[in-house]
Every structure is written in C-alpha cells, then in structure tokens.
Amino acid sequence: MPPLLELRDVRAGYGGITALHGVDISVGAGQVVALLGPNGAGKTTTQKVAAGVHPADAGRLLYGGRDVTGIASRDAASAGICLIPEGRGVFPNLTVRENLWMMTFTGKSREEVEELAFSRFQILKERASQTAGTLSGGEQQMLALTRGLVTDPAVLLLDELSMGLAPLVVEKLYEQVAQIARDGVAVLVVEQFASAVLDMADHAAVLVRGRVEYDGPPGRSLRNELANLYLGSAT
C-alpha cells in the first residue's frame, strides 16, 4: 500500500525566500512520524503544503499514491486531511459543547459528536457547559484535537501539540495520538522538543534550514545526534 501522505522533493517559500529545499516526507496508515527541528527549520511550512494551505513551488504532493499537487485546502480536508495548527484554535466565547456542535457540518449529530469527544477525554464532559476560553491550555488542546477527530481523518497533522503545556498533560495527549494511529490514521507531528514525541513515534525526520538532515528510526542514535543537528543549523 502506498503511504497515505507523501511529499516528494517539495520546494516552497514566501515572497521569493525559499523555506523548503526539496523535502521528502511520507506517512503510512497507522504510523506516527515526528517532524523535528529548530525554529525556522520549515516544519510548519511542510505541514501547510501537506494540507493544501500553502502551495508548493516545485515537487509533488500525493494522497494515497494519487498526485494532488496544487490541491486547495478545502479539497484536502474533503480528502481526509486534518490540520490542527499551532495555537489550538477553539472558539473561546463558546462553551465546550457548543464548540463540538460546530462540527455537525460533517453529518454527525450533536449526540454523536459529544459521544466521540467525551469518550476520549472525560474532562471535556465535566467542562461541557464551561466557555472554552476559561479552560486550561491542556483542556483547550484536548478540545481542538477532538474537534479534528470528528471529521474522521485519514491523515492527522499536528503542529506543536505540546506548546506551553505541562509534561503530564503532554503525555496524556500523546497517549491519545498513539491510539488514533492504532485506529489506522496516518499522523504527522511537528515538534520542536523531541522528548515530547519520540517515545511514541514510529519514525522521525529532522528538518534543518528547509532540508531533511535525518530520516529514520527514533532511537538512541537520533537522540544522541539531535544536539549536533540543532546546533549545527546555526553554523
């Protein structure tokens, strides 16, 4: 079976400045791929290209082996690509329940949406009538993640899931991410802090200045090499 998501020799940039210099990334069904690298390495741009949010200047984007280069973000979402960007993206003035009800456009009933959300995160059920803006950072991230899962994605793109959260909260979130992958979803996780994701990733890639400098297993050799990769990006 071909990977559910594949970027081949992708180049992309902003206003004449190249951010990605021939990036190759692939994610298969049931696989968690950690995309690591220092600030400004091109991680978020890679995800935006994968989700049709930002165009590639060159190279190819494939979904399930089918060339979809140039696809619009709306069509990418219809194809099963779900991007949860950095910053959580909940509606702060709506309650948890109302945030979830916004996802009924997928064809699911309010009851089905709530059941999916509350079965994964019991705390959201306890906070159902609370406005999302008053939730803790971890609870807001749980809500954002659940809203994305309601779309039944084939590919889940997560950008800096751990940002600003306590380690125990991050651990709980990534337990859910691992379960999502076991259900057959292809997961590409962007993280600046490798320790947050490497224990549950199946594969890892390290971007430095828009180029993939490591592509392989997330084992001890990568952990030993990360400091050199990150620090080397500044030389």
Image: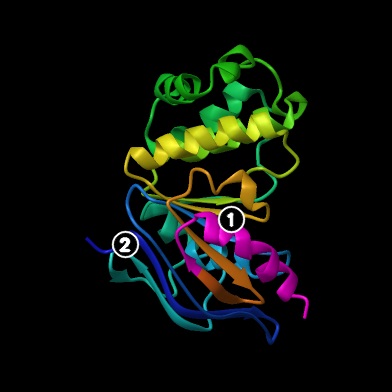
- Residue where numbered disc 1 is placed: 190
- Colour theme: rainbow
Q: Which amino acid does label 1 sit on?
A: Val
Q: Farthest residue in the top direction?
A: 126
Q: Which amino acid does label 2 sit on?
A: Pro
When the figure is inspected, residue 43 is found, relative to residue 201, above or below; the finding is: below
Give 211 or 78, whichever is nearer the viewer.
Answer: 211
Which region shows up in magenta?
215-235
Q: Where is residue 186 in the image (x, y as percent from the top left)?
A: 39, 51
Query: Answer yes or no: do the residues labelled 2 and 1 have beta carbons within 8 Å?
Result: no
In which quadrant is the C terminus drawn? bottom right
- Residue where numbered disc 2 is placed: 3
Tell me what residue is drawn at x 66 percent, y 29 percent.
Answer: 168
Q: Where is residue 160 in the image (x, y as percent from the top left)?
A: 65, 50
Q: What element carries label 2?
A: loop
Quarter assignment of residue 53: bottom right
In which quadrant is the N terminus drawn? bottom left
Q: In this view, does 194 lie to the left or right of 61?
A: right
